Amino acid sequence: MRDADPAAADRIRWNERYAARRPDFAPHPLVADARAAGLPGGPVLELAGGRSGSALALAADGRAVTVVDVSDVALAQLRDEAVRRGLDSCIDCVWADAAPVLAGGAHAGPWALVLATRFWDEAAFTAGASAVAPGGVLAWEALRRDEPQDEEAAPHPYRIPHGGLSARLPSGFTVLAEQATDTTTRLLARAPGRAADRR
Ligand SMILES: C[S@@+](CC[C@H](N)C(=O)[O-])C[C@H]1O[C@@H](n2cnc3c(N)ncnc32)[C@H](O)[C@@H]1O
């Protein structure tokens, strides 16, 4: 993990939140959207998944799911719930900063689905998109930035304007859907190339 950096501060902040609030383990709606779009066979990567109900739902589908997060508290809660549901052999919890974990090695992909919800990190988005398998899907939701930017102010680091996700896709991706919700912007996009199978 990039220690003594923003990820370390995020870890402390998110650990406190996860320790204070009970999880509901509800899957994110983008999971249903990705299933409906059709995914090739193969494993799934969720970035900044926290104590992810999406990961549990995808593991229940029979997917091998890797969840990366800086919060060890969230990952412990997810692991406990996976054990309770008999899904622990399908979920790999990786305690790490999202962007660097994709840079080569065991987690570089290719992944049938790369998922991130309520998370924005431009480097992680770029690396995540590059790690999608041919014909696979990138499903991403980030908090939306609506307010006109004060030219003097630094851009909000954790938010992105609607349309900003598709604008940052590598070439060759097809946008399947891009939607603004009350507070977020959501993208579903397919990587170029033919998938061997799709389900
Ligand atoms: C708003 S929560 C979203 C959690 C989950 N994806 C959801 O939709 O409920 C943001 C998550 O990002 C994680 N996070 C923050 N910075 C991160 C980083 N640099 N790398 C990996 N995870 C990070 C936090 O620990 C937290 O779990």
Image: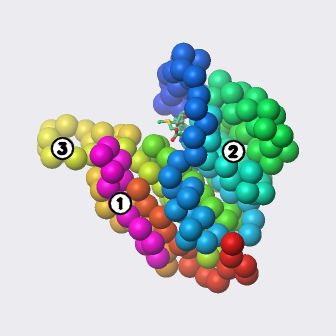
Height in image: 188 above or below 82? below
- Residue at 78% of width from left, 57% of height from top? 62
Q: How is the image coloured?
A: rainbow
The percent coordinates of residue 74 (x first, y second) are: 63, 29
Q: Tag 2, which secondary structure? A: helix
Residue 131 visible at all? no
Q: Amino acid at mark 3?
A: Glu
The percent coordinates of residue 19 (x first, y second) are: 59, 18
- Left or right relative to 2: residue 198: right
Q: Amino acid at mark 2?
A: Leu
Of badges 1 and 3, nearer the viewer stands 1
Q: Amino acid at mark 1?
A: Gln
Q: Could you give the CA–CA distance between mark 3 and mark 2, rounded to whole angstroms?
A: 35 Å
- Residue at 33% of width from left, 51% of height from top? 181
Height in image: 111 above or below 150? below
Of badges 3 and 2, nearer the viewer stands 2
The percent coordinates of residue 32 (x first, y second) are: 56, 59
Earlier along the polypeptide chain: callout 3 or callout 2? Answer: 2
Q: Quadrant of the N terminus?
A: top right
Q: Quadrant of the C terminus?
A: bottom right
Residue 24 visible at all? yes
Q: Which residue is mark 3?
A: 147
Earlier along the polypeptide chain: callout 1 or callout 3? Answer: 3
Q: Which residue is mark 1?
A: 179
Ligand 1: does it lie within 8 Å of the C-beta at label 1?
no
Q: Which mark is residue 56?
A: 2
Q: Could you give the CA–CA distance between mark 1 and mark 3, rounded to whole angstroms?
A: 18 Å
The percent coordinates of residue 34 (x first, y second) are: 56, 63
In which quadrant of the rendered view does residue 162 lie?
bottom left
User: Do tag 1 and tag 2 residues touch (Cβ < 8 Å)?
Assistant: no
Q: Which residues are magenta?
A: 174-185
Earlier along the polypeptide chain: callout 1 or callout 2? Answer: 2
